[in-house]
Amino acid sequence: MTRSFPAPGGALAAALCEVQARQAVTVAARLRYPTEMDAALVGLAGPGGSGRLDRVTGADTGGGGEGWRTWVDEVVASWAVCLLADARLAVTAVTALGGDGCGEFRRLVAPGEADRGAAALLRHPDLVDPVAGLHRSALLGRLDPDATLVG
């Protein structure tokens, strides 16, 4: 995510942007894989890779040395971008995890001025919409307390 939507500025801005992205990915992954069994199953089957995300963002995959791309979970990445682009949705998601998540995920749910500046591109709703839109409805369904598991 931080490659496609980099932080403007120097090393501090890049670090602040990465922290926010990591917090968003952590929340998204915990929502997507709420149990140890869920996480173990994705580890066994594999998450699917970054192919479609690369195409949507126009990322330059550049060739070799990037085996990590096979372990990108498109749904988690899409959900994370949704959370970064919508502060209210981020608060709802962190609250759904329970506990004192708002403190643990402060840079995601209550970013300061430096955080917002560092992740301006990553948090811009119009810029990230192609990625966020891939799985936004599934995230909203996951966060809907009235949703049923059986349809």
Image (cartoon, rainbow, N blue to C red):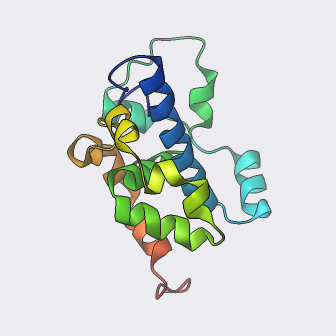
As displayed, is residue 146 above or below residue 6? below
* Residue at x-position 32% and y-position 23%: 8
Residue toward you, 9 or 2: 9
* Residue at x-position 56% and y-position 29%: 69
As displayed, is residue 121 above or below residue 103? above
As displayed, is residue 150 above or below residue 14? below
Is residue 138 visible in this depiction of the protein? no
Q: Quadrant of residue 38?
A: bottom right
Residue 123, given in percent of the width and then of the height, sits at 33, 44
* The N terminus sits in image quarter: top left
* Position of residue 112 in the picture relative to residue 38 (left or right): left
* Residue at x-position 44% and y-position 30%: 2
Residue 102, given in percent of the width and then of the height, sits at 55, 62
* Position of residue 115 in the picture relative to residue 150 (left or right): left
Extreme residue toward the front, this view: 113
Residue toward you, 129 or 61: 129
* Residue at x-position 63% and y-position 59%: 30
Residue 39, given in percent of the width and then of the height, sits at 73, 55
Residue 60, given in percent of the width and then of the height, sits at 38, 18
